[in-house]
Structures are given as structure tokens and as C-alpha cells.
Image: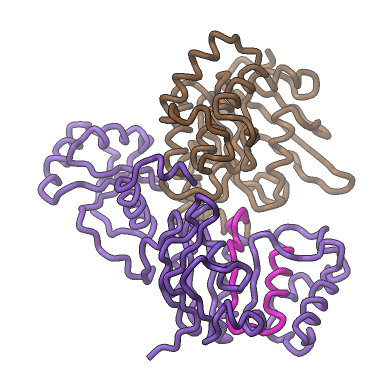
Chain colours: A brown, B purple
């Protein structure tokens, strides 16, 4: 273990270059165990680049980065076992059923058959999807797919789940139900790292980091950011910070 | 009397088992900035495709500036500018070539209408030799808008131009729309973002192929149920269970840094407030509020949902 404190993600001086282009310019921050951490920024600010590094999918150019106690240079496979990931293009298989998708992902994470069967029925019940367990993914509405994709991403009880714009395209109620699931996951001890373009969702986060042109422009609790930038809501905070560039 | 630019008359459209549009019937005035607000699958794109003559409705009719979209589709295509959700740019042509191509297709030139697109195009002009495929999302969006405007259409149709776009670019896009509108162009725009709805003259709230309501976003109709907001130093999420366990609570939802709570009856208010005092949260602020567009939309969604069973939804 690299760290012993309550920081589940520790990033010091993260730099990522693509040729001459600096996508992440000396990022230093941490994420606390059990918090909802919002990672915001304009398109092209470097969010996806940083997330890919934290998930062990890409190497940083330099900097110290530890995720769930593991080093991103040497222990990427260990990191992958301890995290969950869901993006706006969720990776459910359209031509498999709801239940088949759950079993496939649970199997990939090496969970036992008996364990999978019992958790799977609990999950379907909680999502009120019992009656459609045998439907193909392509037949179910987008909102249900999103909830299922999230449930699948945390099925193996990861220490951290990364959510990359998870709520695009759904109605305002489904979006809120999704956020209730996120809050619920934190009660089970899962840390949430989330990006979004919906600024009202930034308010649901414990702390928010705003990236501008590859750098961290601000990082604090939403209430503190609103006070600091004399804004009524996070949308105003974001626009003030990101428009400067 | 206001001149009607676009009229949808009892539009029906099915795709196999899926009812994409159900009895859609409304009009858009000349020069209006009209928003279609709704989630994916609400029918926004289908309605636009019918309007721009790319899709024929099963029944009903649609008129644009007096032309029937079915019969007079050739005329329709001359007067409409259309920006689909997936930009129809030629990725292997340069910025300049794309624009010239679109102008040519409509029998005009870039110079003839340059004043209309100047403010937008000037932002991507430094990259005019770059292939469209190599542009950032924001720049593609600006180029697609320039191409949709280059023949000076009288009606502009924008299908989710800001989806997946960051808050700053969204703001800038809407500033551009307001300028275009001052040129007298009627604009129909769809979006899943409620904050953008407020910038329209009127909006239609859509869900599952049906228009739930049409309104002026600056005058959200007052509701019959008392609505409150709760703020607290604690996570508002922790109060959801409290409210949802109350019979007097009609709904409770996260709402930015607040909870929005709707009660069943005026007479429930004092009981609920007494219950809140017992929770002894000094940081709590509890205030009666007016409904926002989003409150109204959520109320309509809930009403629509409770009148249908889940499996009808499931057929989609």
C-alpha cells in the first residue's frame, strides 16, 4: 500500500503530453474515501485523458498517481480489479439479455456462480427489472439501461466507480433516480468519481474540481465555490471560470 | 393576428410497434424561437424529420410557410435550414469546401449571404483550410450551423445542437441563436437541457411521442399543490426518505443543492413543518417556492406515468 490515509485517489504533479500538446498540466488533487467527487471541465479540458490514466488505461507522462492504494505505472491490473467504470456509451451488449449482461460482467470480475445468482436477483428486484430479466438490452428504454449499466459497474463492489457523463439524454426524473442510486452507492462505501455537463448535478457532489485548458482552476465544496465566485449556482461558477480561457 | 410559420396537424407516426408520435398538434409563429424539450425517445427528431420532408407521417399533415411537407417538398427544402443531431458535414472536405458545397447545392454563394453567418463563421475562419473531420466538437457545431444558414432559410431547424456540449459552449450557442432570430428567421430547436428552455419564446414539453404541454417558459402555470424547497448543511439526499414516508407528501426530488417537495394539500403544510422541527437541523431552510419549468415537467411526467402501466412503456 502506498498511502494509509483516507485518500483513495492521490495525484501529485500529473502531466500527460501528446506530442507538444499538454493535455494534463501538473494536476495535484486527492479524492477522499466515500465521497462524490465531481470532475468538470469544458470539452477538451483534459477530463477524459485524466480519467483514462486513473483507470489504468493510459500511462501518464510524469507525476505520482495512486488509485485504491496502487501505483498507476506498475499495478494497473490491480487497479482495474478495484474500480468500476461507466460512460455515456455504456458497454452493455445490445444483443444479450439483461441477466446475461450481469453474468458476463460479474464473471469477468471473477465472482462465483452462486454468488452471482443471489446478487443478480437482489439487483433485479431493487431496480424493479425482474420481469424483464430475459429481455434483450436493445429492447429496454434508455433510462433503464443507464440504471442497469451503473449497477453492473458496481456489481463487484469496487472501491471507486468512475462515471463519465452518465446521465445524458434521459428525462429529469430518471436523471434524479440515477443520482439517488449514486448516493446509495456511497452509503455502501463506494467512492464516486463523476463527470457531467449538467451543472445542477455538480451540486450533488461533495467536492467539485473544475478543469480549464488542462489545469485545475478550482477545487472545493460547491457551497464554497459559489461563495468564492459570488455565484448563485454552479453553472455561474463554471461559466466564470471556463470563459476566462 | 400572428402569421403561422409551422403547423403540425394531428401528426401520427409509428415504427413497427413503437408509437413515435401520437396526435401531435401545434403551431409555431413566424419569427418565433420555439423549443422542443424532452428526453431521448420523446419524438423530437421524428417530428423534425417530418417537418423537413425526410419522413412521411402515417396520418396528419404539416405545413411550413403555407407549403405542405408531403406535396410541396421541393419548396420546403429551399426554405428550411436543417442541422441534424449528427452533423451532416463532409469530414474529408475542408471547412471552406463544406460551406461552398452547401451554398452551391442551394444555388447561391457564400458571399451573397456572408452577413448572416459572419459572427459565427469568423470564429472558425482561421481554420478554413482544415478538414472538417479534424475540428473540435464546438467548431464542428459552428460550421454545421453556418452550412444550415448559408442559403438564408426562413425556418431554421436544430436537432439537439447542444447535447454533450459544455456549459460555456452551450451559452455561446444560444447567444448566436438570439442573433439569428433577430434576422427574422423562425427557429425550432430541441434540447434535453431545461435551462435552455427558458431562452425560448414558447416550448413544447414532449414525452413518449406526446406533447404534454405547450407554454411560455417565463410564465410557468401555478400548480394546485404546495411546493417547497429545502436546503441544509447536511446532504439534502438524507431527507428524501423522510418526505417519501409521509402520506401528505406527493413527491420529493433532489434539485441542485435543494430538495423540492410537493405536498398533497394546503392543510398538510403545518403538520409537515412540525415534523421538520423535530429533526432539529439548525442549518435547514424551508421555503415555499414557485414552480420552475423543470418542476412542471417532472409533475407532468409523473402524472403521465401513473396513468400508464410499466409494460406499455416497455414496448418502446
Q: Nearer the viewer, residue B189 or B10?
A: B10
**Residue at point 55%, 19% (across, down):** A157
Report the quarter where the N terminus of chain B lies. Answer: bottom left
User: On the rendered structure, is B52 left or right of B272?
Assistant: right
Q: Does the magenta stretch include residue B248?
A: no
Give x and y (percent) for residue A74: 80, 19
**Residue at point 65%, 13% (across, down):** A110
Work out whether residue A142 can be spotted: yes
**Residue at point 33%, 48% (across, down):** B302
Work out whether residue A224 can be spotted: no
User: Which residues are drawn in magenta?
Assistant: B140-167
Q: Which of B3 and A64 is in front in this view?
A: B3
User: On the rendered structure, is A148 left or right of B93?
Assistant: left
Q: Which of A110 and B22 is in front in this view?
A: B22
Give x and y (percent) for residue B143: 74, 69
Q: Nearer the viewer, residue B248 or B276?
A: B248
On the image, which quarter does residue A15 sit in?
Answer: top right
Give x and y (percent) for residue B159: 59, 64
Q: Does the magenta stretch include residue B151?
A: yes
User: On the rendered structure, is B139 left or right of B155?
Assistant: right
Q: How many marks?
A: 0
Up/down of A1 relative to A174, above or below = above
**Residue at point 60%, 46% (across, down):** A40
Q: Residue furthest left?
A: B267
On the image, which quarter does residue B312 sit in?
Answer: top left
User: On the rendered structure, is B302 left or right of B67?
Assistant: left
Give x and y (percent) for residue B83: 65, 68
Amino acid at each position: 500500500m502506498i498511502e494509509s490515509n483516507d485518500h483513495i485517489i492521490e495525484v501529485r504533479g500529473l502531466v500527460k503530453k501528446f506530442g507538444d500538446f499538454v493535455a494534463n498540466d501538473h494536476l495535484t488533487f486527492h479524492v477522499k474515501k466515500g465521497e462524490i467527487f465531481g470532475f468538470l471541465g469544458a470539452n477538451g479540458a483534459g477530463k477524459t485523458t485524466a480519467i483514462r490514466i486513473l483507470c489504468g488505461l493510459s500511462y501518464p507522462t510524469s507525476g505520482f498517481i495512486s488509485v485504491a492504494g496502487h501505483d498507476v505505472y506498475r499495478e494497473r491490473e490491480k487497479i482495474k480489479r478495484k474500480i468500476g467504470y461507466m460512460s455515456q456509451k455504456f458497454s452493455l451488449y445490445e444483443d444479450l439479455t439483461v441477466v446475461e449482461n450481469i453474468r458476463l460482467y460479474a464473471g469477468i470480475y471473477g465472482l462465483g456462480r452462486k454468488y452471482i445468482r443471489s446478487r443478480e436477483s437482489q439487483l433485479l428486484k431493487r431496480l424493479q427489472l425482474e420481469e424483464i430479466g430475459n429481455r434483450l438490452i436493445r429492447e429496454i428504454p434508455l433510462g433503464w439501461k443507464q440504471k442497469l449499466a451503473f449497477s453492473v459497474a458496481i456489481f463487484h463492489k469496487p472501491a471507486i466507480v468512475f462515471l463519465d457523463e452518465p446521465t445524458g439524454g434521459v428525462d429529469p426524473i430518471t436523471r434524479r433516480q440515477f443520482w439517488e442510486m449514486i448516493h446509495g452507492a456511497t452509503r455502501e462505501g463506494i467512492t464516486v468519481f463523476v463527470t457531467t455537463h449538467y451543472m445542477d448535478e455538480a451540486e450533488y457532489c461533495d467536492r467539485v474540481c473544475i478543469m480549464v485548458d488542462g489545469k485545475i482552476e478550482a477545487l472545493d465544496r460547491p457551497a464554497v465555490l459559489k461563495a468564492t465566485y459570488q455565484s448563485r449556482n454552479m453553472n455561474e461558477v463554471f461559466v466564470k471560470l471556463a470563459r476566462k480561457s | 393576428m400572428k402569421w403561422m410559420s409551422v403547423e403540425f396537424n394531428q401528426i401520427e407516426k409509428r415504427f413497427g410497434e413503437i408509437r413515435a408520435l401520437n396526435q401531435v398538434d401545434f403551431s409555431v409563429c413566424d419569427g418565433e424561437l420555439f423549443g422542443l424539450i424532452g428526453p431521448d425517445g420523446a419524438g423530437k427528431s421524428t417530428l423534425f424529420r417530418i417537418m423537413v420532408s425526410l419522413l412521411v407521417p402515417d396520418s396528419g399533415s404539416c405545413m411550413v410557410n403555407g407549403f405542405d411537407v408531403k406535396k410541396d417538398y421541393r419548396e420546403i427544402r429551399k426554405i428550411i435550414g436543417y442541422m441534424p443531431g449528427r452533423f451532416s458535414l463532409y469530414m474529408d472536405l475542408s471547412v471552406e469546401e463544406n460551406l461552398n458545397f452547401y451554398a452551391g447545392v442551394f444555388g447561391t454563394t457564400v458571399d451573397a449571404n456572408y452577413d448572416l453567418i459572419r459572427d459565427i463563421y469568423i470564429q472558425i475562419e482561421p481554420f478554413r483550410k482544415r478538414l472538417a473531420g479534424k475540428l473540435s466538437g464546438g467548431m464542428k457545431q459552428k460550421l454545421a450551423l453556418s452550412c444550415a444558414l448559408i442559403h438564408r432559410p426562413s425556418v431554421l431547424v436544430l436537432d439537439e445542437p447542444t447535447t454533450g456540449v459544455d456549459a460555456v459552449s452551450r451559452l455561446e450557442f444560444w447567444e448566436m441563436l438570439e442573433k439569428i432570430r433577430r434576422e427574422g428567421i423562425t427557429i425550432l430547436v430541441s434540447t434535453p437541457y431545461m435551462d435552455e428552455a427558458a431562452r425560448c419564446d414558447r416550448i413544447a414539453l414532449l414525452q413518449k411521442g406526446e406533447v404534454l404541454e405547450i407554454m411560455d417558459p417565463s410564465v410557468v402555470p401555478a400548480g394546485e399543490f404546495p411546493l417547497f424547497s429545502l436546503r441544509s448543511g447536511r446532504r439534502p439526499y438524507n431527507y428524501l426518505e423522510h418526505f417519501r414516508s409521509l402520506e401528505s407528501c406527493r413527491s420529493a426530488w433532489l434539485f441542485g443543492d435543494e430538495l423540492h417537495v410537493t405536498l398533497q394539500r394546503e392543510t398538510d403544510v403545518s403538520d409537515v413543518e412540525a415534523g421538520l422541527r423535530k429533526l432539529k437541523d439548525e442549518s435547514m431552510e424551508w421555503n415555499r417556492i414557485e414552480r420552475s419549468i423543470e418542476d412542471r415537467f417532472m409533475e407532468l411526467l409523473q402524472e403521465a406515468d401513473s396513468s400508464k402501466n410499466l409494460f406499455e412503456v416497455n414496448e418502446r
